[in-house]
């Protein structure tokens, strides 16, 4: 097992990884930017290294500084968390070249799944259903239009290198197409330095249903059930839950088998997520694979009792998975992402000092956060300040727990999304479980006022 793990991240996920390491008897190293000097992860780690100024480009994204920090402190492994360098194949390669274990999949696995169009091709080759679309990237607008016309409108044009909802454009008809195609290409070029795009059938009201997978170096690949992440704003998840409200054991068996097949197609090692779209007619399609721990991983942890971060560490150390089959999925779990943002002002970030911070508690309530009273939310990074996760016997109980937990989650000093989430938990459609990825856009207007 590792002696010392450096966490190449900040915020709640850095704390989450520190906890897993300490439970496993592993020492930890925190890295921080000048803006994060007062952060809890710096206080809770055994060792800490300042890696540069506030801007992530000059700190958390600087590979040589992270490697140097690991070497100075004698860390033998690096956990990347999510975001920043978590899906950067070059970082994984540099770790290996420096004799440091990257806690995650191989550079090849990261690269294959990071290119959406390559990932699609790998899935097609392994008979995992993908959304109907172009077999690979298309450069020529006329060729792309011909494909779109054959499939039928609407279609979505997507950046091969896409992520975070960037480089995606919907085209409703042939007139719309050329403009959307060029927009997607130029957005992809400026966001990812790669203008390659492909075309997919656009599903009108799909659910976003993703499967958590785990693989080890001994050939085991399992899934740990699904998470429904349909409540999104501009393709960003706000609420996640499991089980998916419309899931049946039969559908889970089929989708889970497809997820495992997808992960096995690249001999996947570590924790990963196969994201799929579930259409209203019950058809499902592979969308992409995330080759890292995800923000919403606690949903699966509470549903299964499996510690996903510890599994990541075990697998990276060459040990077999601690679980060898899909565990029993117990009860119902909901997660709300609490952001320092103002929903009344188009979710504009609201950084600043937190004066009052009171967390909810009780049976089945988990809060993953790096915030505390007196902490200043810096303006430089993601505005998520806490994840609130509740576990009930069934969905109704989970919703009741979430409502109460949100009511008793008191944060003053910065504006947060807590009141918005509280109203969302009362929305009749959410309560019925009748949501899709465009739910907030189409039916959430009254939630924002
Ligand atoms: P990113 O990597 O940028 O997050 P994804 O491919 O994961 O992009 O897609 C993000 C979201 O975009 C999905 O959760 C879904 O809401 C929407 N989406 C993607 N592809 C389609 C599609 N073919 N039809 C309808 N919605 C889609």
Image (spheres, rainbow, N blue to C red):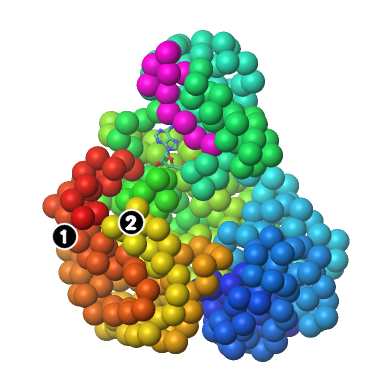
Q: Is residue 438 visible?
A: yes
The picture places residue 336, in percent across and down from the top left corner, at 34, 64
Determine the residue positioned at 25% across, 72% down: 406
Where does residue 260 sit, x and y in percent of width and height?
A: 52, 47
Q: Which one is in front, 49 or 208?
A: 49
Above-or-below relation of 72 to 148:
below
Residue 174 is a magenta residue: yes
- Residue labelled with disc 1: 426
Do the residues bearing badges 1 and 2 touch, measured as CB atoms within 8 Å?
Answer: no
Q: Who's the residue at 50% across and 21% down the image? A: 179
Q: Which residues are magenta?
A: 167-177
The label number, if any, that marks residue 345 in the structure image: 2
Judge whether 417 appears above or below 74 on screen.
above
* SS class, disc 2: helix
> Ligand 1 sits in which quadrant?
top left
Q: Quadrant of the N terminus?
A: bottom right
Q: Position of residue 44 (x, y in %)?
A: 58, 87
> Image quadrant of residue 79?
bottom right
Q: Quadrant of residue 358?
A: bottom left
**SS for callout 1:** loop
Is 139 left or right of 208, judged from the image as shown?
Answer: right
């Amino acid at each position: 097992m590792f002696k010392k793990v450096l966490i190449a991240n900040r915020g709640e996920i850095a704390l989450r990884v520190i906890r897993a390491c300490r439970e496993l008897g592993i020492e930890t190293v925190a890295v921080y930017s000048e803006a994060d000097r007062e952060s809890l992860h710096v206080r809770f780690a055994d060792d800490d290294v300042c890696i540069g100024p506030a801007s992530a480009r000059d700190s958390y994204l600087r590979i040589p500084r992270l490697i140097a920090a690991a070497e100075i402190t004698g860390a033998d492994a690096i956990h990347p968390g999510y975001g920043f360098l978590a899906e950067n194949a070059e970082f994984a390669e540099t770790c290996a070249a420096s004799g440091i274990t990257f806690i995650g999949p191989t550079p090849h696995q990261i690269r294959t799944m990071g290119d959406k169009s390559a990932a699609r091709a790998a899935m097609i080759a392994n008979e995992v259903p993908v959304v109907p679309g172009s077999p690979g990237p298309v450069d020529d607008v006329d060729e792309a239009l011909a494909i779109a016309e054959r499939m039928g409108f609407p279609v979505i044009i997507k950046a091969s290198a896409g992520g975070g909802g960037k480089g995606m454009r919907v085209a409703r008809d042939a007139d719309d197409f050329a403009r959307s195609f060029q927009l997607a290409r130029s957005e992809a070029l400026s966001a990812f330095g790669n203008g390659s795009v492909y075309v997919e059938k656009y599903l009108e009201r799909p659910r976003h249903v993703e499967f958590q997978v785990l693989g080890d170096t001994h050939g085991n690949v399992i899934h740990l059930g699904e998470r429904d992440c349909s409540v999104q704003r501009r393709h960003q998840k706000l609420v996640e839950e499991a089980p998916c409200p419309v899931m049946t054991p039969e559908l889970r068996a089929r989708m889970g088998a497809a997820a495992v097949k997808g992960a096995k197609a690249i001999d996947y090692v570590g924790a990963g997520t196969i994201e799929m779209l579930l259409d209203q007619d019950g058809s499902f399609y592979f969308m992409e694979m995330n080759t890292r721990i995800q923000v919403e991983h606690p949903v699966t942890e509470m549903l299964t009792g499996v510690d996903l971060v510890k599994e990541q560490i075990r697998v990276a150390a060459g040990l077999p998975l601690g679980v060898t089959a899909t565990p029993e999925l117990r009860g119902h779990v909901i997660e709300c992402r609490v952001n320092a943002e103002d929903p009344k002002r188009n979710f504009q970030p609201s950084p600043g000092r937190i004066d009052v911070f009171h967390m909810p508690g009780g049976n089945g309530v988990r809060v993953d956060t790096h915030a505390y009273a007196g902490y200043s939310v810096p303006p430089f990074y993601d505005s998520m300040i806490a994840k609130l996760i509740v576990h009930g016997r069934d969905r109704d109980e989970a919703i009741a727990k979430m409502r109460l937990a949100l009511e008793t989650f008191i944060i003053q000093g910065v504006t947060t999304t807590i009141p918005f989430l509280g109203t969302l938990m009362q929305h009749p459609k959410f309560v019925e479980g009748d949501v899709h990825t465009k739910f907030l856009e189409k039916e959430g207007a009254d939630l924002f006022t």
